[in-house]
Amino acid sequence: MADVSPTTMNAILSGLPLQPFDESLPELAHTPPEQHTTVEPAYSNENKIKELEAEVALLKGIVKGLQRYLDRLEPWTKEVHAALSKLGKEPQSASPTRSELIERILARQNIG
């Protein structure tokens, strides 16, 4: 059935008088619209299910996006952590400055 609002469905049902097939069956006679309200909960449930399914799909997409972001973030975080842990430490592979080289040369000459 096409998506029809419960109000529209009730209006349609209330506008269609039900003619009994057999005059001996009075329960098939026209019933007032308030007895057709069973359409509304069923329609509401179907819509709720569709809305919830759409929301679940949206949330799954968000989770996948967050996973991709975290996958890219991890290497960067490790680099930052390594850089921060080196702060305040002397560089291990730093070459001596020109003045340090001169001091070393002079120190060797005085020793030798």
Image (spheres, rainbow, N blue to C red):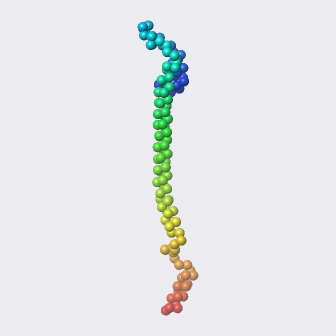
In the rendered image, the vertical position of residue 56 relative to residue 41, given as above or below: below
Q: Give the residue displayed 51% in from the left and 88% down from the top.
A: 108
Looking at the image, residue 10 lies above or below residue 65? above
Decide which of 101, 41 is in the foreground and name it: 41
Residue toward you, 89 or 75? 89
Residue displayed at 49% across by 52% down: 69
Figure disc tally: 0
Q: In front here: 35 or 17?
A: 35
Q: Nearer the viewer, residue 71 or 14?
A: 14
**Residue 99: x percent and y percent?**
57, 81
Give the residue drawn at x 51%, y 69%. 86
Residue 111 screen position, x and y as percent: 50, 91
Above or below: residue 97 compared with residue 27: below
Q: Position of residue 82 (x, y in %)?
A: 49, 65
Q: Position of residue 95 (x, y in %)?
A: 51, 76
Q: Residue furthest top?
A: 23
Q: Residue at x 53, y 78 (%)?
A: 96
In the image, residue 58 above or below residue 37: below
